Image (cartoon, rainbow, N blue to C red):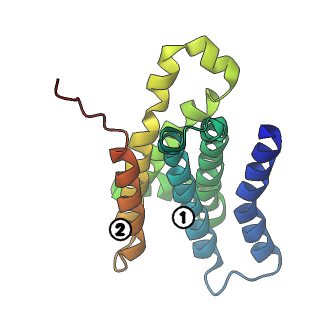
Amino acid sequence: MIRYLKSSVFTLSLIPFFLITYKIFFNKLGPEPVKEITHFTGEWTLVFICLTLAMSPLKRFTKLTFWINIRRMLGLFVFFYATLHLLTYVVIDYRFDWGPILNDVVKKKYIYIGFSAWILLIPLALTSSKKMVRLLKQNWKKLHRLIYIIAIFGSLHFIWLSKTIFFKPLIYTLIILFLLSLRIKFKKNT
C-alpha cells in the first residue's frame, strides 16, 4: 500500500515539470518566457520546501508514519526544482556567461541568498539515501536540519526578488515560519 502511495506522490510531484515542459514545447510561456520558467521553477521549489517541512508535524498530529516515508522524496524534489530554477538562470538566461553570473552573485543579495540555498541543498541531496542515513547515523539528522536555513533563504530570495508585489512572498514566508515554529519544543513546568 505504501509503495503505491509513494508512487502516486512521485507522479503528482512531476506534474509541475510536465506542465512547464508542455508550455515550453507549445510556446505557451507568454511574452517573457525565461522569466516565466524562472518564476515557475522557483515557486515550485518553495512549494516543495513547504511540503517537506510539513511532513514531521503531520506525523506528530496524525500518528501516521506515511508522512516520514515520503519526506525524503519531497526533499529531493526541492533539489530537482531548485536545480531547474538555477539552470534556467545559468543556461537559458545567461548562456553560461560566467562573468555576469558571478557579478550577480556578488552584487545582488537575492541571487546570493538563492545561490547559497542551492549550495546548501547539495549535501542534503547527496546524503538522502538509506545507506547514507545508516552511515552518518546521528550526524544525518544534524546535516538535514540545514533545510530550516534553506527554507528561510528561499523565502528571503523571493522577498528580495519581489520589488513591488510582496503578497506571494509574504504568504510563503508566513507558511515557512509557521512550519518552523511547529518544531519548537516547549519544556513543561514540573
Give the x, y percent position of residue 40. 60, 68
Residue at label 1?
Answer: 43
- Indicate which disc, 2 or 1, sits on the residue closer to the N terminus: 1
Q: Residue furthest front?
A: 190
Do labels 2 and 1 touch, CB within 8 Å? no
- Name the element at disc 1: helix
Please state the horizontal and vertical placement of residue 34, each as a whole percent of the image: 62, 73
Q: Is residue 110 visible?
A: no
* Distance from Cα at disc 2 to Cα at disc 1: 13 Å
Q: Residue furthest bottom?
A: 31
Residue 186 x %, y %: 25, 34
Q: Nearer the viewer, residue 182 or 117?
A: 182
Q: Quadrant of the C terminus?
A: top left
Name the one closer to the observer, 128 or 92.
128
In which quadrant of the rendered image does the N terminus lie? top right
Residue that label 2 marks = 170
User: Closer to the camera: disc 2 or disc 1?
Assistant: 2
Q: Is residue 36 left or right of residue 29?
A: left
Badge 2 crowding class, 10 Å Cα cut-off, few under 14, some 14 to 19, many 20 or more, is some
**Amino acid under disc 2:** Leu
Q: How many marks?
A: 2
Q: Is residue 5 above or below residue 25?
A: above
What's the residue at 55%, 46% (across, down)?
A: 52
Identify which residue is drawn at 61% across, 20% down: 133
Question: In which quarter of the view is residue 33 placed?
Answer: bottom right
Q: Amino acid at mark 1?
A: Glu
- Residue 148: horizontal and vertical position, in percent? 41, 41
Q: Quadrant of residue 84?
A: bottom right
Camera-nearest residue between 21 and 110: 21
Say whether residue 32 is visible: yes
